[in-house]
Image (cartoon, rainbow, N blue to C red):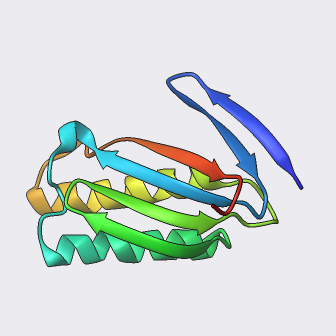
Amino acid sequence: MNKEFKVYKHNPPHLFVADATYMVTAATYRKEKFFKTEEFLELLLSTIFYYFKKYEWLIKAYVVLPNHYHILGVASNRDVSLPNIIKSIHKYTARRINEFDKVSNRKVWWNYWDSCITYES
């Protein structure tokens, strides 16, 4: 089992294990409801599906809400890329939401948290 522990300057540390199951939660900045319409929720969900598939992660369960989302996913065995997935999702959706609202450089996402599920129960 490939394990890698990463520490980031302004974020909590993350333990990455290939082929492991993760619970991921991400929240919008100040819990603002940026994804308040069906169209925006679909944008977020399709972007999540796209990037998880691109990095060969399997989504087992998910929920998307106007100001946050949760994903239960299984890590790829080829590389450790959760930060890349989340960064891509947040960058793309923030750009699209800001374009729609005709604002630039507005902060949309706050942070994400992940937990490596180490046992079934």
At x 73% / y 53%, what residue is drawn? 80
Q: Nearer the viewer, residue 70 or 91?
A: 70
Residue 52 pos. (x, y %): 56, 70
Asked whether residue 106 appears in the rendered view, the answer is: no
Q: Using residue 83 as the reference point, say whether residue 61 is left or right of it.
A: left
Residue farthest toward the right in the current orientation of the protein: 1
Quadrant where the C terminus sits is bottom right
Q: Nearer the viewer, residue 25 or 79?
A: 25
Q: Please name the residue shown 53% across and 69% down the image.
A: 51
State the image coordinates of residue 3 (x, y, percent, origin top left).
83, 46
Percent position of residue 119, x then y: 70, 57
Residue at x-position 75% and y-position 36%: 5
Q: Nearer the viewer, residue 101 or 14?
A: 14
Task: Give left or right: position of 80 versus 31.
Answer: right
> How far across and how far down the image is residue 118, in percent?
71, 52
Instruction: Describe residue 10's horizontal placement relative to residue 117 as left or right.
Output: left
- Say which quarter of the image contains residue 93: bottom left
Residue 102 visible here: yes
The residue that appears at 57% across and 22% down in the rendered structure is 9
Quarter holding the N terminus is bottom right
